[in-house]
Image: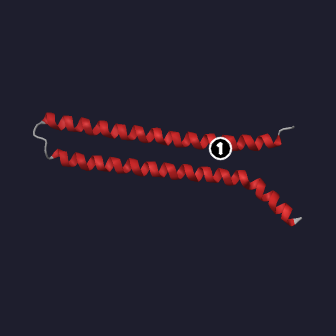
Amino acid sequence: MFQDMTKKMSESMEPFKDLVNIQTRMLEELTRQQMECTKSCIEATIQQTKELQKCQTPADLLTLQQAYAKELEETLKAASNENLKALHDARDEIEKITKGAFDAFAPK
């Protein structure tokens, strides 16, 4: 009897375990993406600093700054898109789990 109760309890907690796993994977993915974005921005800044020394005219500086801003914009847009994808994927998985949990209570 105790084993049956333990088994039922374990089965009933399974959706919650799945939710925690989904959230953990999502947070790990978001963290990985943010680390990549930060690394890319730092590398672009370092490259920008090196290139600044080569500027001879204000036009050179303006062109360099525009290229730098464009590179950062593209990096941040890509990071944003990847973050949204991770969030949407997690939401879809959570919706499946909750739908399955509610379906279990639906009359047959």
Q: Residue at 68% across / 55% down in the picture?
A: 17
- Where is residue 84 shown, x and y percent of the image? 51, 39
Which residue appears farthest toward the left when viewing the image?
A: 56
Q: Residue at 45% across / 40% down in the picture?
A: 80
The residue pinned by badge 1 equals 94
- Where is residue 87 shown, x and y percent of the image? 55, 42
In the picture, the quarter occupied by the C terminus is top right
Quadrant of residue 61 within the rendered picture? top left
Q: Residue at 33% across / 40% down in the picture?
A: 72
Tell me the crowding category of disc 1: few under 14, some 14 to 19, or many 20 or more residues within 10 angstroms, Cα based: some
Image coloring type? secondary structure
In the picture, the quarter occupied by the N terminus is bottom right
- Where is residue 51 shown, x and y percent of the image? 18, 45
SS for dot 1: helix
Which residue appears farthest toward the bottom when viewing the image?
A: 2
In this image, 62 relative to 86: left or right?
left
Which residue appears farthest toward the right when viewing the image?
A: 1
Kind of residue at disc 1: Ile
In this image, 105 relative to 78: left or right?
right
Q: Residue at 20% across / 34% down in the picture?
A: 63
The image shows residue 10, relative to residue 33, as above or below, that is below
- Where is residue 99 shown, x and y percent of the image? 73, 40
In this image, 30 relative to 17: left or right?
left
